[in-house]
Image (cartoon, rainbow, N blue to C red):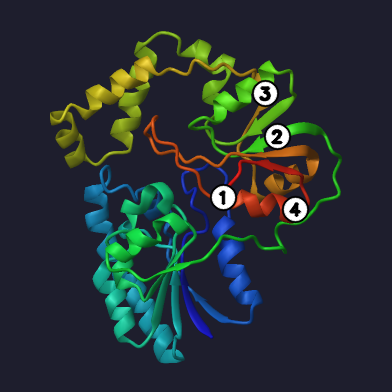
């Protein structure tokens, strides 16, 4: 099969360390399965960083037509060279215009979009999903919502590439570890393990904000307030700044930052940085017990949504002992 593949290398485009998680688990297996894969030659990093339509409306309105135009140009050239059978993407609404997907379908090319954040970010693909022939959906409880908007979902569970995720011959150095972002109830779980005298270590984005050293630097309220304002202004288009200021959203978010300075204080020595893909896989072999947290970051304290994670496949495939919630 001749496949045109379009996706960024990783869903974590804003991390300092470049990850290849999607390329490893989506692109490379298609090659290994013997397909002729043509890759979309476009830097999608900024596009993926700014998929939130509520914060990046102006950027998306300007960027999406550019991405769509270049996507269609490359697909048409590849299709003329030798017919494309399938368009396979990991796209959000912010990545492509619905008309672009329809144009690809009009060329006789089947279209499929893979997306695995529908558990709590379904709204980010609502516009484009009905325009694909099929949507691959790993969240079984979201299938009906896809159908309700006119999309054709196919339940497709996640997996991991055995050529990437495999045991490593390294010393077992840690009792209990977690590799992943710090959000939701994860810091609380780590704190409770520490309180129970369990030697636990964490690596990933955001854990430094729960360190004792970090919190001592932002003890006074005006510091988290100033940080919130800076982050808001640096990640929001000018038009959205004025709109949200008028709605007092900035004031509310700043007030929330002051009142929600983390109360959990973790020892600096248990907190590590973001790991590279290889370091992450090796950590599964360096640990006696690898933790798996299943909740999503919904932003709503009263709502706890759980979902299957890539980690649920990566750790066992890497030969690690995995402790995870019941799903």
SS assignment at label 3: helix
Q: Residues within 10 Å of mark 1 (few under 14, many from 20)?
A: some
Q: Which of the pair 14/188 is nearer the observer?
A: 188
Q: Are marks 3 and 1 in contact (CB under 8 Å)?
A: no
- The reply to whether dot 4 and dot 1 touch (C-beta < 8 Å) is no
Relative vertical location of residue 244 with respect to residue 84 in this rendering, above or below: above
Q: CA distance from mark 3 to mark 2?
A: 11 Å
Residue 219: percent from the left, percent from the top? Answer: 45, 9
N-term mark: 4 or 1: 1
Which one is in front in this view, the residue at disc 4 or the one at disc 1?
Answer: 1
Q: CA distance from mark 4 to mark 3?
A: 24 Å
Residue at 57% in and 62% down: 23
* Nearer to us: label 4 or label 3: 3
Left or right placement of residue 123 versus residue 178 in this view? left
**Which labelled disc corresponds to residue 193?**
3
Q: Earlier in the sequence, mark 1 or mark 2?
A: 2
**Residue that badge 2 annotates:** 177
Viewer-proximal residue among 226 and 172: 172
Labels 4 & 2 near each other (Cβ < 8 A): no
Whole-percent x, y for residue 195 in the image: 67, 16
Tell me the CA gap for discs 1 and 2.
Answer: 16 Å
**Displayed quadrant of residue 28:** bottom right
The picture places residue 8, in percent across and down from the top left corner, at 47, 59
Number of the front mark, 1 or 2:
1
Q: Which residue is mark 4?
A: 318
Residue most extreme to the left: 246
Q: Nearer the viewer, residue 287 or 269?
A: 287
Measure the C-alpha gap from mark 4 to mark 1. 15 Å
Point out the image quarter for the N terminus. bottom right
Tell me the tag on residue 309.
1
Up the image or down, 252 lies above or below 171; here it is above
């Amino acid at each position: 099969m001749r496949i045109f593949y379009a996706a960024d290398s990783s869903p974590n485009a804003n991390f300092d360390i470049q990850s290849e998680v999607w390329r490893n688990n989506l692109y490379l297996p298609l090659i290994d399965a013997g397909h002729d894969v043509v890759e979309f030659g476009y830097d999608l990093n900024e596009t993926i960083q700014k998929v939130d339509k509520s914060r990046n409306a102006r950027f998306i309105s300007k960027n999406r037509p550019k991405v769509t135009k270049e996507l269609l140009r490359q697909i048409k050239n590849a299709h003329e060279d030798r017919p494309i059978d399938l368009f396979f993407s990991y796209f959000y609404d912010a990545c492509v215009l619905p008309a672009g997907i329809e144009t690809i379908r009009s060329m006789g090319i089947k279209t499929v979009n893979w997306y695995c954040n529908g558990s709590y970010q379904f709204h980010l693909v609502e516009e484009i999903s009905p325009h694909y022939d099929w949507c691959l959906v790993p969240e079984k409880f979201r299938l009906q919502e896809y159908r309700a908007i006119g999309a054709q979902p196919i339940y497709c569970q996640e997996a991991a590439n055995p050529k990437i995720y495999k045991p490593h011959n390294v010393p077992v150095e840690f009792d209990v570890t977690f590799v992943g972002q710090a959000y939701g109830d994860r810091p609380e779980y780590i704190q409770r393990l520490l309180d129970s005298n369990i030697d636990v270590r964490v690596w990933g984005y955001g854990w430094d904000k729960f360190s004792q050293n970090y919190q001592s630097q932002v003890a006074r309220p005006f510091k988290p307030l100033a940080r919130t304002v800076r982050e808001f202004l640096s990640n929001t288009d000018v038009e959205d700044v004025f709109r949200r200021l008028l709605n007092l959203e900035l004031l509310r978010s700043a007030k929330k930052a002051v009142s929600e300075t983390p109360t959990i204080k973790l020892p600096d020595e248990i907190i590590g940085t973001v790991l590279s893909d290889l370091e992450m896989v090796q950590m599964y072999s360096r640990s006696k017990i690898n933790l798996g947290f299943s909740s999503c970051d919904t932003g709503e304290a009263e709502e706890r949504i759980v979902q299957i994670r890539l980690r649920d496949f990566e750790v066992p495939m890497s030969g690690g002992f995995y402790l995870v919630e019941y799903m």
